[in-house]
């Protein structure tokens, strides 16, 4: 077990819950900077290791087991990641840009992303302020089409009219879907289910 493996596994754990490293720390009741990259080396340059208590609390916050953490350690042991498509929200609203499963087919730019075992993921650049302070304009989120979503998940939604937005999933039934903004200046929206083209889960953010 190496120093870099531990920290990569923590990043992967956060990504699976759609959180940044600081977001995972907050969810675990830790100082938000506990897992930040700046905390991974001491002032003298020596590697700084996370405590078993902080890892245990992070696992509890992510509803994950030590076995799952060990799998992340093994799966993230090496590699610089892979190239995945990156698109902007404005362009994502264009007709024909996504296939029927919500994956971009017209993106010609890519970004490197650590391989978490999910083949069909892409990067989306946030626009607007409806998800501040969690996501700000220019932040990059990694989106997984086809992933199961549940209430409280951060998601990207595309309407049949071509509007693309990042929101938190609220109530959902056969008739309506509620989309919640984290910015209190933006009220929740309710869309008829028939007006929604697809919903994709946000699995990682660049904050």
Image (cartoon, rainbow, N blue to C red):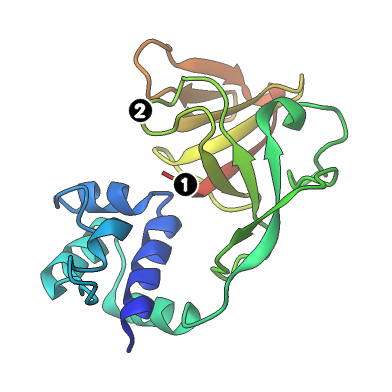
Question: Is 173 located above or below residue 84 in the figure?
Answer: above
Q: Are marks 2 and 1 in contact (CB under 8 Å)?
A: no
Q: Position of residue 57 (x, y in %)?
A: 17, 62
Distance from the alpha carbon under mark 2 to that under mark 1: 13 Å
Indicate which disc, 2 or 1, sits on the residue closer to the N terminus. Answer: 2
Q: Quadrant of the C terminus?
A: top left
Q: Position of residue 122 (x, y in %)?
A: 66, 51
Question: How many residues crowd around disc 1 within 10 Å: few (fewer than 14), some, or many (20 or more)?
Answer: many
Query: Could you say which quadrant of the image residue 111 lies in?
Result: bottom right
Q: Which residue is most to the bottom?
A: 1
Q: Position of residue 159 (x, y in %)?
A: 70, 25
Disc 2: which residue: 133
Q: Which residue is most to the right?
A: 96
| Residue 62 in view, yes or no | no
Disc 1: which residue: 205
168 or 43: nearer the viewer: 43
Q: Is residue 168 left or right of residue 157?
A: left
Question: Is 71 located above or below residue 170 in the figure?
Answer: below
Q: How many marks?
A: 2
Question: How many residues crowd around disc 2 within 10 Å: few (fewer than 14), some, or many (20 or more)?
Answer: few
Label 1: which secondary element: strand
The structure residue drawn at horizontal position 23% and vertical position 61%, both measured from the top left corner, is 39
Q: Position of residue 38 (x, y in %)?
A: 28, 57
């Amino acid at each position: 077990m190496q120093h870099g493996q531990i920290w990569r596994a923590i990043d992967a754990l956060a990504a699976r819950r759609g959180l940044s490293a600081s977001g995972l720390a907050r969810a675990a009741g830790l100082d938000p900077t506990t897992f930040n990259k700046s905390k991974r080396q001491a002032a003298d340059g020596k590697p700084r290791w996370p405590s078993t208590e902080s890892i245990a609390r992070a696992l509890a916050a992510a509803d994950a087991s030590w076995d799952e953490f060990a799998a992340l350690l093994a799966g993230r042991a090496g590699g610089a990641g892979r190239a995945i498509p990156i698109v902007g929200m404005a362009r994502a609203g264009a007709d024909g840009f996504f296939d029927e499963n919500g994956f971009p087919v017209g993106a010609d730019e890519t970004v490197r992303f650590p391989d978490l075992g999910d083949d069909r993921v892409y990067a989306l650049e946030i626009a607007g302020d409806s998800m501040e302070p969690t996501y700000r304009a220019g932040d990059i989120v990694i989106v997984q089409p086809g992933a199961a979503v549940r209430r409280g998940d951060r998601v990207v939604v595309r309407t049949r009219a071509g509007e693309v937005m990042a929101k938190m999933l609220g109530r959902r039934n056969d008739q309506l879907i509620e989309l919640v903004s984290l910015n209190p200046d933006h009220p929740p929206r309710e869309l008829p289910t028939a007006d929604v083209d697809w919903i994709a889960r946000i699995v990682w953010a660049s904050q």
